[in-house]
Amino acid sequence: MRAARQLIGLALALGLAALPATGGDLRDLYFGEALYHAYQGQYFDALQRLDTELAQYHVLDEPALDTLHYHINDAEFSVGDFELDYRMHQRAGRAIKAVLEGAVDEAVRNEAAFRLARIHFQKGQFDDALQALARIKGMVPEEIRGDVEFLRANVYMATGQPSEAVKVLAQLKSNERLAGFVAYNLGIALLQDGRPQEAIEQLDKAGQLTADDPAGHAIRDKSNLVLGTMLFESGNFERARQSLDRVHLEGPFSNHALLRAGWAEASAKQYDRALVPWNILVDREPTDAAVQEVMLAAPHAYASMKLYGRAAIGYGRALELFSNQIARVDASIRSIREGQFLNALIREESREDETWVIRLRNLPDAPETYYLMELMASHDFQTALHNYLDLEDLRSRFVAWKTSLDAFDDVIRLRGQNYEPLLPEVDAQFRELDSRIRLRIEQRKHLAERLQAMLTAPRPSYLATAEEQVAGERIAHIEKRLGDSNDPESLALRQRAARLRGALTWRLETEYNDRLTAAYVHLNELKTPLDALNQRYDAFVRTRQAATHSYVGYDVQIARLRERVDEALQRVDVLIARQGHMIETVATNQLEARRERLAAQQTEARFGVADSYDRAARAQSDAGGN
Amino acid sequence: MRFHSLRAAVLFGLVALALMANGKMPIAAAQLGPPRASPSVALSASPTSAQAGQPVTLTWSSTNATSITLEPSVGPVAAKGSTTVRPSQSSTYTVTATGPGGSAHASAQVTITPAPSPAAVQKPSQEDISSDQREMRGLDEQIQDIKSDSLRMSAELSQLEEKLLYPSGTQVAIFVELAKGDTMRLDAVRLQIDGQLVAHYIYSAKELQALRKGGVQRIYVGNVTTGDHRLEVLVDGKLEGGADFSRTGEFAFHKEVKPKLVGLTLAGPRSGNTPITLGDW
C-alpha cells in the first residue's frame, strides 16, 4: 500500500500562487504595464518593466514625487510574485526583503514578512520561513491573518513539528475560507503526531464538510480516500467502505476510491458487493492504473465466487487490454525518443489553458501522455516542462535581440552617413550666428546698464535723437568758426547760435523724463524677441547634441551586448538540449516502469485465463461425475 | 454474498449496468444489497453545483418499486427517468421508492453558488528526492541563472532602444486602460497624431482580460516635436448584448523637452463614464 502512505504524507498548501499585489487606484502607468504583462502570464516582460521602474525609482533624489511612490510596496511585492511565477526562486524575495528592511508601517512590514515566509516555504527553506514568520508582530492585515497561520502550520508540518501544527490549526477551525484545508491538514498533523484515533475522527469530519466548489470537493474526496485507506490498512473494512463510499464518482480520486471500496468488500469476502464498484471501474479510462488493477481484481472476485466462466471472460478482456496498452506504451516510448513529445510541448495550441499537458495527447503525432499524468502533476516535472518552454522563449528572444542589434548598427551607420557631411557646415553657420547673437545680447546688456546709471546721474545728451546730435554738432562748429570776434555781425551770429543751443538744451532737459521712460519701454520690448532667440538657440543646441548622440558612442555598448547575447544563445542551446533530454528520460523511465507493470499484469491475466478454464472444466466434469 | 444462481447473477449484472450508466451519483447510492424483492433506487444531479436559476438535471432509476416520489417540488414520477429543475437555493433532492418489499431512498445534493470563485490552489509538499529530481533541480538552477542574465540584458537593450529610437526630447508614449469595473468588450483602438495613423491595435481575449483586471497597455511609443499636438482616438467594441459600438475622441496635448506620457481611459457607453478620457502623466 505504498500509494496510501504517499497520500497520507501530503499536506495541502493553499494560496501559494498569489495574484500580483495592487492596492487602490493605479497612479503609475509603467507599474500598470507590468501588471498588464503579468495578467497575461508574460512574466519576463512584467519583470523587466518592473525591475527597470524600481531601479529608476531607487536612484531618484526625491522619490516621493514619483508616481511609483504610491505603489512602491505593492511593486516590491509584485516583483517577488512575478519571480516565483517565472520560476526564479533564487531571486524571489530580494525585493520583499527591501520592504522589510525599509521604514514602513507595521501592517506593510508584516505582510512583507508573510510573503517572504511563503517564498521560503516554496523554496523548501523552512527554517528561513519560520524566521520570517517570527518577524510578524502587532497589527496583521485582516485579509492575510488566516493565511499567515495556515502557512505557519504548513511549515511546522514540513519541519516535523506536528504538535505545533495541531495547535495552530485548531485555532483556525472557524476560518470559513480555509475550512476544508484546515480540517484535512489537522487530520494529517494529528496522524504525524502519533494520535491516529484523533486523526481518524478529524479526517472523518473533513470528509463530511459541505463543499460548494471543485477545490472543496477535491479536499473532501481526498480526506475520505486517505481515511478509507487508513481504515482499510488497519483491517476496519466496514468503516473503510463507508468512508470510500463518500468519495464522489466524478472527482479525481474516484477511480482510486472505487478500487479501494471494492478491496474493502473483497477483504471481508463480500465479493459480490466488491463487484459493484469494480464493474463501474472496468469501463473507465483504460490507461488509468486503478482501472488496470481492477481488470484483474474483478475476474478474481468471480473466480472466488466459483463463477469460472465469467472469470475466464474477465481475464480474457484483461489480457486484451494489457496487450493493447503495452503496444500503446511502446509506441509512446518510440514517439518520445523521436522527439515528438518535446515537439508537441512547444506547439502554441498545446498551451491554451492549465490542462495543456493532459491535452497534449489529443494533438496529432503526440505521444500518449495519459501514462505521464501522475508525473506531470508533480511539481518538479511541471517546473521542468515550464522551464523547457521558458528556454525556448528565451532562445527566440535572443535571436530577435541579435536582429535588433544588427538593426541598431544599421541605424547608427545611416545616421552617421547622413549627419557627418552636413554637420561641419551647420557648425560653421552656427558659430557665425552664435557670435552675432552674443553681440546683440551684449549690446542690450550695455544699454540696460547705461539706462540704469542715468536714473541716478541724468545725462540728457545721451537721449538726444540723431537729428538733435547733428544739430548740436553744427552749432558747436558754427560757434567755433565765429570765435571771439567782437565785430557786430559776429556778435549777432553768436547770439543766434547761443539761442539755438539754448533751445536744444531746453528740449533735451524738459523732455528728458519722457525720453528715459520711452527708452525703458523700448528696451523691454526687446525682451520678447530675445527670449525667442534664446529658446531657438537652446533648441538648436539640443537638436545638435541629439544629432551626435543619435550615432556616436554606441559601438562599445552594442559590441558588448552582441557578445553577451551570442554567449547566452550558446548557453541556452545547451540548456534546451539538456533539459529536453532530461524530460524525455524521466518520461520514458516512467513509461518503462508502467510497461513493466503491464507486462506483469499481462502474465497474470494469461495465467488467470488458463486457470479459469481449467477450473471451469473441472467443475463441469465434477458436476457431470455427480 | 455469493451468486447462488444464474438469475441472481443476471439481475446483479443488470443493476450494475444501470449504475454504470449513471456515473454521477455518489458511491453510497450505488451500494446495493443482494437482489431481493425489496425496492432500490438511485438518484443523481448534474451539475451538482450551479448558480441560482440555472437548470440542473435529476436522473433516477429504481427496481422493485410500485411508486416513486421525487421531492421537493417534483412529486410522483416513473420508475426511471430524468427531469430538469432550477433551484434558487441549495437543496437536497430525495427520491423515495416504495414496493411490496418495503421502501428505499436516495438523495442528491445541489449546491447553489453565488458566483464563480477562483479555485484554491493545492500543491504537494516535499516528496522523496530521486536522482531524476536532483538533476532537474540542478538544471533548474542553471536556468534561473540564464533567466537573470537575460533580464539584465533585456533591460539594457530596452534602454539602448529608447536612447536610439525614442530619445527623451522627442519621446511620446500612449497608454490604454479600461475604466474600473467596465465590462465592455474592447475590440480595437486606433490612434492618429496630427492626422497620421500611428497605431491600430486589435485585442485578443487574453489582453482584454488583462485590461479588465487593471493592467495598462503601452499601445504606442514614438517621436513628436516639442509643442502642441492633436490626438484622435477611435474605439471599437461590443456591448454585453453583442451590439457593436464605436466612439471617437479628439484631444490636444503639449510636448515639452521631457518624455511625454499620455494615458487614455476607456469606458463602455453604458457605464455612465466619459467614453474616452485623456490623462496627463
Image: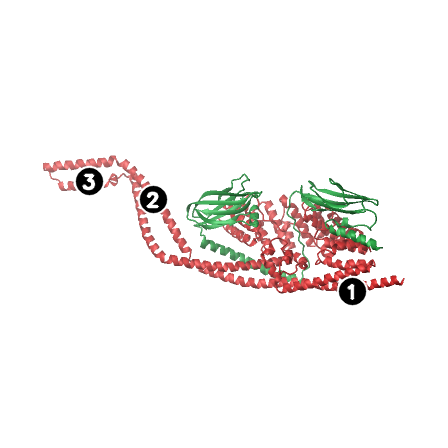
Percent x, y for residue A154?
68, 51
Q: Which residue is mark 2?
A: A529
Q: Residues within 10 Å of mark 1 (few under 14, many from 20)?
A: few
Q: Secondary structure at mark 1?
A: helix
> Which chain corresponds to the colour red?
A
Q: Residue at x 74, y 40 (%)?
A: B72
**Could you give the CA–CA distance between mark 1 and mark 2, rounded to whole angstroms?**
108 Å
For marks 2 and 3, the one nearer the N-term is: 3
Colour pattern of the rendering: by chain
What amino acid does circle 2 point to?
Pro
**Can residue B144 be seen in this snapshot?**
no
Q: Chain of mark 2?
A: A
What amino acid does circle 3 point to?
Ala
Q: Is residue A615 left or right of residue A20?
A: right
In-front residue for pair B151/A312: A312
Instruction: Specify whether disc 1 shares its chain with disc 2.
Output: yes
Instruction: Specify whether disc 1 shares its chain with disc 3.
Output: yes
Q: Quadrant of residue B242?
A: top right
In-front residue for pair A491/A370: A370
For marks 1 and 2, the one nearer the N-term is: 2
Percent x, y for residue B28?
77, 49
Q: Residues within 10 Å of mark 2 (few under 14, many from 20)?
A: few
Q: Residue at x 39, y 52 (%)?
A: A543
